[in-house]
Image (cartoon, rainbow, N blue to C red):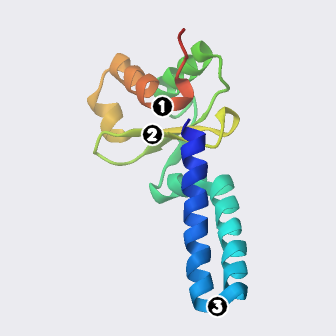
Amino acid sequence: MNMVKTAMLIAFMTALFMGVGFMIGGTGGMMIALVIAACMNLFSYWKSDKMVLSMHRAKEVNRKNAPEYYGIVEQLAQRAGLPMPKVYIIDNPQPNAFATGRNPENSAVAATTGLLNALTREEVAGVMAHDQPIFKIETR
């Protein structure tokens, strides 16, 4: 359902962009707007995860420099039967966490230092498991 909503939003925004292109440059302007919108959509699909991580100045971590946090993510990925995502830390005192990526094979999770310092290991695991869609396990 979310894919349908996303596709509809992208189609609407592309049509809006094309409408503005038509108003400015007629049929030629509309076609130029379509090409620009297609390029922007493809770029966003392939690079949005890297853009958001860069925007937050996230630093990739591994088992050596963040063993507890990395271990939590690794354990969650194993339990969910998913590939291990890249793990990032954001130097920010505000507690927050998010996941990004176009699919489980190209996913990344990030947590702020504020979240990691304020919560216990179990609480961090709960936040990562609950808020990160790549770890959701469907129950029937």
Q: Earlier in the sequence, mark 2 or mark 1?
A: 2
| Front-most of residues 110 and 26 | 26
Instruction: Give the residue pinned by disc 3.
Output: 25
Residue 96 pos. (x, y %)? 35, 40
Residue 110 pos. (x, y %)? 47, 40
CA neighbours of label 3 inside 10 A, class few (<14), some (14 to 19), many (20+):
some
Q: Secondary structure at mark 3?
A: helix
Residue at 59%, 54% (x, y): give it.
48
- The Cα–Cα distance between marks 2 and 3, rounded to whole angstroms, is 41 Å
Q: Which quarter shows the N terminus?
A: top right
Residue at 66%, 37% (x, y): give it.
103
- The Cα–Cα distance between marks 2 and 1, rounded to whole angstroms, is 6 Å
* Image height of 96 relative to 124, above or below: below
- 131 displayed left or right of 103: left
Whether residue 9 appears in this view of the structure is: yes
Tell me where residue 61 sits by quadrant. Answer: top right
Q: Earlier in the sequence, mark 2 or mark 3?
A: 3
Instruction: Give the residue pinned by disc 2.
Output: 98
Residue at 60%, 68% (x, y): give it.
15
- The Cα–Cα distance between marks 3 and 1, rounded to whole angstroms, is 43 Å
Q: Secondary structure at mark 2?
A: strand
In the image, what residue type sits under mark 3? Gly
Instruction: Give the residue pinned by disc 1.
Output: 132
* Image height of 84 relative to 88, above or below: above
Q: Secondary structure at mark 1?
A: loop
